[in-house]
Image (cartoon, rainbow, N blue to C red):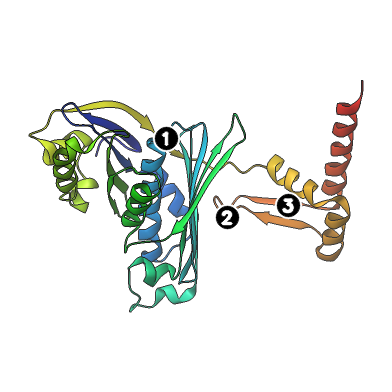
Amino acid sequence: MKNKDILTRFIFENAPVRGTIIQLDSAWKTLLLRKDYPNLVQTQLGEFIAANTLLASTLKLNGALVMQIQGNGPINFMVMECTSEKHLRGMAQFKEEINNPQQGQSLPDLFGDGQLVITVDNNKSNERYQSIVELKGNKISQALESYLTESEQLETRIILATSDEFACGILVQKLPGETDENADDWNRISQLTATIKSEELTSLEPENILHRLFNEDDVRILETDNYTFQCSCSRERVSNMLISLGEEEIDSIIEELGAIDIDCEFCNQHYNFDAVDAKELFAANIHLTTSKTQH
């Protein structure tokens, strides 16, 4: 593919259906550099980053869409974030038994009794919408289809594919508010979408994918977006988190350990705070608070 880290939107001119194709290259490889994941975990993580980006593309996002899977299986936690600035980050936590060659690959095998948590954070209004549902199906795509159909009343078909080089996916969705008069169109498009092969999603250009699937339909490609891996962590954010713990608690930790060391699980950035840093942290906070209360 010549287009890297590109999301392509499209619509059907003669059917009430919209769609999106995501093909991640550099953003996916950058995420993998942060941690050495076993193959089974890497596959789920690749599908999750593609699914998260696809789902975010269906929303009028002004903040971030965060998707999590929490379970008690060999993979006990997975999280992915997509922001309105087109920044992606994510990670997974897993147990050593995931390396068992006999390990199954369905969602119950990998995550156990899991939950899918979808959170939309709105930067302007500081509102948060969160949905927690049972993790249904044997694949991440099936779990999301079930969520969108049952919880959001949006009939959706999602196909995901991943490799060491790419994390890709295609989503088609019946437009909200449409009646059952177009059921035949939706069923046909949904069934055609399911015929795409993994190697086609990870190797063909979006135009070729659409021609391969819908050559008898009038499909119009809309705008495209570029995505990058970028973590939102910073020393300032970590400082604010430490301030929220209180000076007494921070002093106690430093007295016991000598310093506070924090590693970001998303990007592996290391932050160190010693006794001098802590004093400056709370001195600056006191000054800031005092300045705000002056008249």
Residue 204 placement (x, y as % from top left): 19, 41
Which amino acid is tagged 3?
A: Asn
Q: Position of residue 262 (x, y in %)?
A: 68, 55
Q: Is residue 236 left or right of residue 54?
A: right
Residue under label 1: 59
Estimate the spatial distance between the alpha carbons at disc 1 and disc 3, rounded to whole Å. Answer: 38 Å
Q: Secondary structure at mark 1?
A: loop
Looking at numbered disc 2 in the image, what kind of residue is underneath it? Answer: Glu
The residue tagged with tag 3: helix, strand or loop? strand
**Residue at image x 21%, y 45%?**
203
**Considering only vertical position in the picture, is 101 above or below 286?**
below
Residue at which label 2 appears: 265
**Which numbered dot is residue 201?**
none
Disc 3 or 2, which lies upstream in sequence?
2
State the residue lying farthest toward the top.
295
- Compared across the picture, whether 41 is left or right of 191 comes to right
